[in-house]
Image (cartoon, helix red, strand yellow):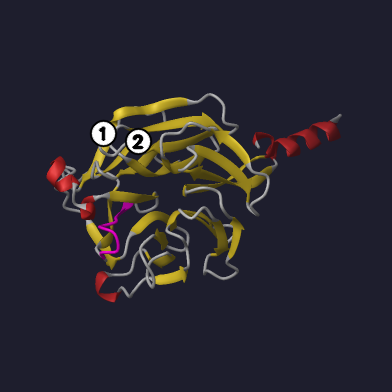
Amino acid sequence: MQVSKGLAARAQRATTGRLFVLELSGGRIFSIDTEGRDKQVLVTDCRVPDGIGVDVARGHIYWTNMGHPEVGDGSIERVDLDGGHRRTIVPSGITYTPKQLQISKETGKLYWADREGMRVMRCNVDGTNVETLVASGSGDAERAQASRWCVGIAVDPVRRHVYWTQKGADNANEGRIFRAGLDLPAGDTPSNRSDIELLYGGLPEPIDLELDVEHRTLYWTDRGDPPSGNSVNRAPMDVAAQRRGAPEIVFSDLMEGIGIALDVEGGRIFVTDVGGSVYASALDGSNARVLMVVQGNLAGIAYAQVPVASR
């Protein structure tokens, strides 16, 4: 009996790596294994899904719906790991066009970039206490300026920073990556923060972000044109401004790269593009390969070690 209980306990603890992918064109979320096999559609009828995060501890998948930019009716939803118990946690009208989403287990918060809303936002994991951390503009005139659009987001719980991209107009080389503290400095407002730091500028069109906090490295996709765009890039997180060099292009030849996810422990990057492919490589870009093709227009991607029974 003790042996049987031990086997059962080990079976309960067994996990497997899964990728969770957003399909813009089909309005769906599907999952695959890390070799591109075992495709399972988990959610349908999404309203232009763009950013995704997986909270294994709480048993939830979260995603953003961009909705219609001219209306500003974006929302955030969640389901269980198996696609059940779907619910809206941030309803339409609170966020404009939410893009990349990140979950911070340390702070118990969801963080997202609101593109035409020109904001960096967060809330509790149940959708309560929605806050604006950064406001890069306001009103319709500034909303028309793509240089103000916040798109990608990442959170450093160690040094308590939030990172985000402002992509700029198409191939205008006005894309930028910023960071600021997780909390507003005393006396500051979201539109007038004293702690915002520009890390990298003059980029084609930086989109989604990921952090390798262990090795203090920032990764991002860029959907602009070659030679710098259609690429995955990386750069140090903590190098002083006067010593920062050009970002390193890890791999290229994407068809408008958007989603990026890291498996730092396994030394892997996973990427999606508008052309409908899912890619994988080592963290340095070596061993780059295509896992899937012709999957519709793909946006966000997340990697998680999930319980085998939750597949």
User: Magenta part of the protein: which range?
Assistant: 161-172
User: What is the three-letter code of the residue carrying label 2?
Assistant: Gly
Counting from the top left corner in percent of width and height, residue 244 is at 31, 73
Q: Residue at x 23, y 53 (%)?
A: 146
Q: Residue at x 29, y 56 (%)?
A: 167
Alpha carbon of mark 2 to alpha carbon of mark 1: how far?
A: 8 Å
Q: On the picture, is 121 further left or further right than 292?
A: left
Q: Are marks 2 and 1 in contact (CB under 8 Å)?
A: yes
Residue 260, above or below 53: below
Q: Nearer the viewer, residue 203 or 182?
A: 203
Question: Tag 1's secondary structure?
Answer: loop
Residue 187 visible in the current orientation: no
Q: Nearer the viewer, residue 69 or 209?
A: 69
Q: Which mark is residue 286?
A: none
Q: Residue at x 40, y 43 (%)?
A: 101
Q: Which mark is residue 67?
A: 2
Q: Badge 1 local density, few (<14 within 10 Å), some, or many (20+)?
A: few
Q: To which residue does mark 1 refer?
A: 71
Counting from the top left corner in percent of width and height, residue 105 is at 45, 41
Residue 152 visible in the current orientation: yes
Question: Tag 2's secondary structure?
Answer: loop
